[in-house]
Amino acid sequence: MNEDAVDRALRSDTIEPSSGFTLRVMDAVRAEAEVPPPLRFPWGRLGLGVAACAALSAAATWLAPDLGRAWDGVAPRLGVALQLGQAALGVAVALTLARLPRLFVRS
Amino acid sequence: MGTEDADSDDVRRVLEGDLAAFEGIVRRWQGRLVGLAWRFCRDRTTAEDMAQDAFLKAFRSLAAFRGDAAFSTWLTAIALNTYRSRLRAEGPPLLALDEAQAFGVGGGLEQALDGRQRDERVRHAVLTLPARYREPILMFYFHDMDVAEAARTLGLPEGTLKARLRRGRELLKRRCPESA
């Protein structure tokens, strides 16, 4: 195949759009414009969250020695706190069980 | 008003909210975009569908047009990417059986083919080339054999484009020798 054959075949190779093409495209464009834009990713909030996490981590690192000393004071009382927590949980469960029949009666 | 000025003016108006101004862009460029799509798929309905997709993508990306390149180059690059994606998703166009059979058939058949059929066979042969050679050939002729513009649209150095054109033509000669 010589280059003239390729040139001749490929230079003049085109078609004209059909008569309704512009209208179809504009209809599609209008439909596209009516679709609300997608929600943008909340980069600002993400940045604030990351900054807050970084600040908390820094504060925790800075306060760690003090927290260790404070923990020494808290540790003996933790056993009492656990028992108090169990008692509170027991009261909450009992109250819930006491209210349960009333809920069934209402429904 | 020149085409570039008209395009810039329409882009500005669309970005200001005048949707109707986009019609000017469509009217000015529909022939080029449909023509380019046709070269990639050789089916009118598919070509118009692909060109419509390209216009929609251009509409969505209009705010990103900075005017660094000519509007025509920017729009053609969007169209090219759209057509590439479409062909990747849907596969290469199917050739009509009689013309597909004509490939590789030598002897007296080519004597019966008139110039138009021969041209069509060359066009189909181009579509069978690997994309790295097919696209430079299609864009080179789409831009009226302007190497610089074809290279800009494809984002290739001119030397690379010329090398691929040369290699693409060699492959064409092998695949379609009877068209000589």
Image: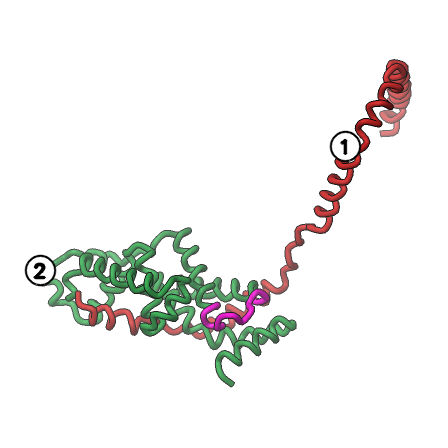
Chain colours: A red, B green
The quarter of the image holding the C terminus of chain B is bottom left
The answer to whether residue B98 of the structure is visible from this angle is: no
Residue at the image point whose x is 87% and y is 14% from the top: A79
- B17 sits to left or right of B180: right
Q: Callout 1, which amino acid? A: Thr
- A41 sits to left or right of B159: right
Residue at the image point whose x is 42% and y is 60% from the top: B83
Q: How many marks?
A: 2
- Establish if A71 lies above or below B20: above
Disc 2 on helix, strand or loop? loop
Which residue appears farthest toward the bottom when viewing the image? B1
Residue B107 is situated, as x and y percent measured from the top left of the image, at 8, 60
Residue sitting nearer the eye, B2 or A37 = B2
Q: Which residue is label 1 attached to? A: A61
Residue B85 in which image quadrant: bottom left
Residue at the image point whose x is 53% and y is 80% from the top: B6
**For the magenta stretch, what is the residue range?**
B62-74
Residue sitting nearer the eye, A72 or B147 = A72
| Mark 2 neighbour density, 10 Å: few (under 14) some (14–19) many (20 or more) | few
- A20 sits to left or right of B122: right
Q: Which residue is label 2 attached to? A: B107
